[in-house]
């Protein structure tokens, strides 16, 4: 064995996105991968259905401590959420070559339920949030 996880192991760790992601409706299964040095703050979300499709995820609460997304109850129910311990909220980040210009999409967070392995991207109605919040303040 070469140390690469078997396909069934990877599939068992996948999250199902019944509706895909906005702009990528055919990508319905994603796995979350660690990024060296990223810890729990920065991850990579890789599509199993389209292996060339991947997104950088950030923990929005680390970068934006006042972030308070109001996830609609219907979305939580669809994910099978029965308590606050069953929700992980991440934001898709845009990380250009100049990393200090990185932004996070706080308007459309990705909500995961690790217990049901289901997830979805939610568009918030809150006007405080946009699709391009700077991760690092300008100097």
Image (tube, grey):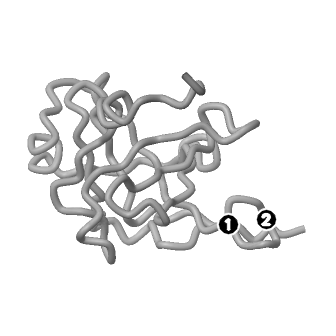
**Residue 39 location in percent, x, y?**
66, 32
Residue at left offset 79%, top offset 65%: 99
Q: Name the residue under label 1.
A: 95
Task: In the rendered structure, find residue 56 and report the number of the disc placed on it.
Answer: none
Q: In this view, does 48 lie to the left or right of 17?
A: right
**Residue 119 location in percent, x, y?**
26, 46
In the rendered image, the vertical position of residue 47 relative to residue 33, given as above or below: below
Q: Is residue 98 left or right of residue 36?
A: right
Residue at left offset 47%, top offset 50%: 45
Count of numbered tags: 2
C-alpha distance separating marks 2 and 1 = 6 Å
Residue at left offset 48%, top offset 72%: 131
Q: Depth check: 101 or 72 in front?
A: 101
Confirm or deny contact between disc 2 and disc 1 (CB under 8 A).
Answer: yes
Q: Which residue lies furthest to the bottom in this view?
A: 23
**Residue 25 location in percent, x, y?**
24, 71
Q: Name the residue under label 2.
A: 99
Q: What element carries label 2?
A: helix
Q: Is residue 63 left or right of residue 47?
A: right
Residue at left offset 30%, top offset 58%: 121
């Amino acid at each position: 064995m070469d140390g690469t996880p078997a396909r069934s192991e990877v599939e068992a760790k996948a999250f199902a996105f019944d509706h895909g992601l906005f702009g990528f409706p055919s990508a319905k299964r994603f796995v979350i991968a660690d990024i060296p040095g990223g810890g729990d703050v920065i991850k990579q979300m890789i599509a199993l259905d389209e292996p060339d499709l991947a997104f950088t995820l950030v923990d929005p609460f680390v970068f934006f401590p006042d972030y308070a997304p109001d996830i609609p109850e219907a979305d939580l129910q669809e994910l099978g959420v029965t308590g606050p311990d069953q929700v992980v909220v991440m934001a898709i980040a845009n990380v250009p070559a100049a990393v200090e210009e990185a932004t996070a999409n706080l308007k459309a967070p990705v909500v995961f339920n690790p217990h049901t392995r289901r997830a979805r991207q939610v568009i918030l109605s809150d006007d405080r949030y946009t699709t391009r919040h700077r991760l690092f303040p300008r100097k």
